[in-house]
């Protein structure tokens, strides 16, 4: 496997680093819209599929039972920055199911947000609530509680919650997710490897409802709308997922995953998107996603201008000096523009 | 340019990510000991050459004038973690030259050490002293002050301090460092791109003194010994450079640089080492350096066992579960062992 260089990182006049990877854009029937590199070998989607992992919470009535609104549903789909309101809202999700944070099994890390981490250090220490996955885990716990399943080992691959997620992922992607495709994610739940072409198709279904059972299509629409309404809850202050969905609302769904993965959907176009950088670089995957949006989403001049800082990111050093840039190669923007 | 995959990152039974790169090992005459990938295209060495950038401080008598011992000299070569003693010792270096931290132009960031960052957040805010490059910058400032040069713009490419560094790098590497090879580093000083084969030769000279003027060879030996004696000052608690030099003392010199660079020397073997991962991944460059050490340095069984966690690193998640590993491919250990 030798994927092409998709992103060059410049410093001064030279290319300092290079990121290879693969990109799939597909419709809900699985027809290829764009395929660059190897889109057929399974990759771990990591946190990029949190919105799919959150679907059973909605489909099975747990979200309604606990009165979850857009904020809670967006958090269930989130890799949040651990800012105070993220933390408070996840704690409230748990409380609705009669749980406290000790039920979370995602592990502990300092908030992704440096400002939140510094503020937290002044007054306390991080807990599992600050883990960027705590909203997803709260969703799993609430699903278990609402449906009368013991929640103690909700993160194990053979727990009913994770078995439901696995079956759902097979439905969306059309991939058979055998044990040989399973590994453990950073937050200890299973992650199932699927080809980018299948993940792209899955997100086209998520974005359109096409090919899904009615209850599933309705749940997907509800999660999409929750993320469009509360994009800050999906990531946090200054983060790409948040800023993109703040700008485009329900026209774009995007979600980052660890190790250089991005997934997304352009519902109006009927397209799903899946990106993996070979080396795991999030900076490159994000720039690629920006270029994919710029290529396939009709944009006003103002929208194109606002997207520019993500399409052509500049790099600055600790003094704020502009020292280089990321440039996405191998993907042509609409009209031949690079 | 298509460098080989040097490091695979596994998750469960699958390869999740891959790092390509190039490696040069050479002697002080420039003879190739090992060359993998493209070792002829210039790369920015970034912080991996701080020990070379620190040489004028010693050669010109500034270190003696200010009474610098091993700790100050190790800090001048350091990418330190911003732990309290690093910060205090850099401040003391500046004070010896009659300067205070306001003279530093490296920019401000939180300490690399998460524990130090959290402790700092409790009591204050980061300053330029906490920048991992503050020891190098203090060295530049002390050089300027001791030799009667205005220190105000010491970080500019045309400042006498940086011109000395450039000439010294040309002497070590044998590369011509024209303006087209110059860019700005994270801490705002110039970084000069040189091929890995030249950098490896330069570090063979640094490690042996071979091919250097006597005053330069003596200064190099003094900096090597300072780093061997005070490896904590070169990086910090738990860091690879520190742990390797704590273990091997003067038998190994290693120094990390941003964007996937590592340089080093094996003085007893007469070898210099230069590594660059195409994608800028430090995790991969570090594992490659560990394998290079294991291959070329004669090791006792106990030393080999102690190095094992760097040669075959395991990856753990936020719960401490072992979820994968890094494995260095394409470099065979001594005796065919992988």
Image: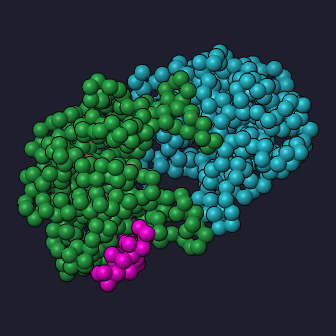
Chain colours: A cyan, B green
- Residue A178: x and y in percent read 64, 16
In the picture provided, is A310 more to the left or to the right than A135?
Answer: left
Q: Nearer the viewer, residue A13 or B45?
A: B45
Q: Residue furthest right?
A: A65
Q: Nearer the viewer, residue B242 or B262?
A: B242
The image quadrant that residue A274 belongs to is top right
Q: Is residue B165 magenta?
A: no
Q: Is residue B93 magenta?
A: yes
Residue at 58%, 51% (x, y): give it: A306
Q: Quadrant of the C terminus of chain A?
A: top left
The image quadrant that residue B150 belongs to is bottom left
Residue at 55%, 39% (x, y): give it: B316
The image quadrant that residue A173 belongs to is top right
Does any portion of residue B87 appear in the rendered image?
yes
Which SS does the magenta portion mostly show?
Answer: helix
In the picture provided, is A226 more to the left or to the right than B120?
Answer: right
Q: Which residues are magenta?
A: B85-106
Does any portion of residue A172 appear in the rendered image?
no
- Residue A327: x and y in percent read 42, 42
- Residue A17: x and y in percent read 37, 42
Residue at 47%, 47% (x, y): give it: A312
Q: Quadrant of the N terminus of chain A?
A: top left
- Numbered label tally: 0
In the picture provided, is B259 more to the left or to the right than A190?
Answer: left
In the picture provided, is B233 more to the left or to the right than A312?
Answer: left
- Residue B321: x and y in percent read 60, 37
Q: Is residue A26 above or below residue B284?
A: above
């Amino acid at each position: 496997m030798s994927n092409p260089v998709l992103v060059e990182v410049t410093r001064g006049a030279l290319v300092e680093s290079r990121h290879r990877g693969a990109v799939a854009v597909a419709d809900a029937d699985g027809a290829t819209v764009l395929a660059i590199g190897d889109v057929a070998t399974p990759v771990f989607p990591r946190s990029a599929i949190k919105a799919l992992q959150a679907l059973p919470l909605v489909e099975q009535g747990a979200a309604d039972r606990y009165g979850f609104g857009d904020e809670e549903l967006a958090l269930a789909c989130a890799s949040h920055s651990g800012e105070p309101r993220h933390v408070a809202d996840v704690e409230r999700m748990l409380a609705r199911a009669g749980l406290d944070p000790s039920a979370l099994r995602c592990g502990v890390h300092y908030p992704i947000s440096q400002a939140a981490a510094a503020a937290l250090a002044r007054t306390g220490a991080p807990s599992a609530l600050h883990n960027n996955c705590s909203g997803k885990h709260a969703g799993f716990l609430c699903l278990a509680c609402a449906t009368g399943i013991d929640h103690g080992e909700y993160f194990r691959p053979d727990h009913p919650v994770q078995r439901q997620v696995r079956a759902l992922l097979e439905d969306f992607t059309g991939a058979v997710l055998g044990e040989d495709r399973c590994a453990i994610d950073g937050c200890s739940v299973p992650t199932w490897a699927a080809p980018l072409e299948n993940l792209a198709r899955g997100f086209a279904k998520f974005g359109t409802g096409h090919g899904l059972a009615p209850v599933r299509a309705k749940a997907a629409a509800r999660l999409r709308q929750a993320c469009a309404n509360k994009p800050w809850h999906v990531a946090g202050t200054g983060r790409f997922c948040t800023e993109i969905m703040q700008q485009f609302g329900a026209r774009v769904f995007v979600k980052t995953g660890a190790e250089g993965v991005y997934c997304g959907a352009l519902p109006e176009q009927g397209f799903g998107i899946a990106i993996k950088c070979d080396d795991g670089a999030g900076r490159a995957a994000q720039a690629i996603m920006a270029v994919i949006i710029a290529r396939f989403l009709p944009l006003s001049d103002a929208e194109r201008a606002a997207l520019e800082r993500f399409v052509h990111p500049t790099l600055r050093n600790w003094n704020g000096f502009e020292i280089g840039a990321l440039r996405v190669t191998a993907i042509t923007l609409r009209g031949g523009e690079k």
